[in-house]
Image (tube, grey):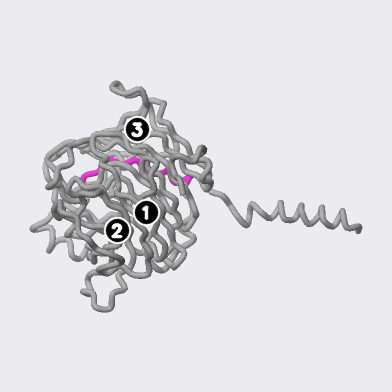
Amino acid sequence: MNRRRICALALMLVMAGAPQANAASPTIRDEFDATSVSDNWFSCSRDENSFSFGKLADDARSAATQVVKALPQNNVLAFAWHPKGCAREDGSYDRDGSERSELWEAQKILAPMGTEIWYRFDMFIDDSITPTTGRFVIGQWKQTNSPKDAPVLAQRFNGRAFTVSLEQDNADPDRDPKNVLCRVFIASQETAPVEPGFGTPHTLVKPAQVFSLMKTETLSVGHDTDDLAHGTAPLSLPGLTGCAQGLSVTRYNSLPDPFGKWTTMVYHLRLVSDQTGLIEIWADGKKISKTEGIIGFKPFLAKESQYFKFGSYRNHAEFETVTRLDHFIRSERKEDVDPDGTLAPP
């Protein structure tokens, strides 16, 4: 066999083997132009929410619109975990003490846990959230069958201040044994009470604890009990503080004020619970922060998938909140989410 044929055969073998070695997750784009949701998404229907899609009456764009309404407070928590608080085909769902109006990435498009991946989306957060509002999450990334039922990464709007937090196992040797998680803030609005690098310990509410706790609080199974607004004065916290460990957090800019307007977000993610984890965040074309190190929970389950969901997820509140999602792109290639280099500059 001559050299040319050997080289050609070697190239054919490399090309044939590449898809198996690097199975790419699909690139997803959604402009929400249609009047019904595409099969890229699962709508988490419940009594307190509603969804609409397509052209906005007060805007030139199309979007997915989610509304979460104020319903009478319900402290009845159920322990059936499927389908994680969303309505089944018969309309029933497991009431979990929280209120939500979320779109979830559909199962068929999920990327493997730890995939290096880019997200770009436009979000509209209305003005309803107040400085006294407690737990309010709008946009989070989770792991299927996670060893901890908490988001790996979350956008939080508690107290009308935009922050982004990650979760990791609480490895502080002096921790309270019940505080198994460490929430680390990696990006913040100027008005937020914490700056990037601050880690706060918290407990995971488990079914055995629920009935003793629900007498005084509205809880969400699998989430902490103290996720409340903290005030308005920023803290100066250089470096990592609290329970945060194994991370490097670099701050470039503050998050913008997102209330009552559209904000363009870009995330570059590698969600793994060893030293190779990565989160880069841009907002409205400005680099906000870069985080490297331990992200998520051990054991790292590479066979599992990561999924994004967007929309209001809150404790009971006495007001209606509208959120909107548009120009959604998810890809393993930066050039797909930022073709001209203006949304995610170095």
Q: For mark 3, what is the residue?
A: 64
First to last magenta residue range:
97-109
Q: Badge 1 local density, few (<14 within 10 Å), some, or many (20+)?
A: many
Whether pointer 2 and pointer 1 mark residues with C-beta atoms closer than 8 Å, the reply is yes
Residue 101 shown in magenta: yes
Q: Amino acid at mark 3?
A: Ala
First in sequence, mark 2 or 1: give its number: 2
Q: Residue at x 32, y 46 (%)?
A: 139
Packing grade of label 3 (10 A; few <14, some 14-19, many >=20) is many
Q: Is residue 228 left or right of residue 112?
A: left
Residue 278: % across, % down: 43, 58
The crowd level at tag 2 (other Cα within 10 Å; few <14, some 14-19, many 20+) is many
Task: Choose top left, top right, bottom left or bottom right for residue 194.
Answer: bottom left
Question: Furthest residue to the left?
Answer: 216
Disc 2 from disc 1: Cα separation: 8 Å
Give left or right: position of 272 versus 325: right
Disc 1 is placed on an element classified as: strand
Give the x, y percent position of residue 185: 29, 58
What residue did someone put label 2 on?
196
Percent position of residue 306, x then y: 43, 53
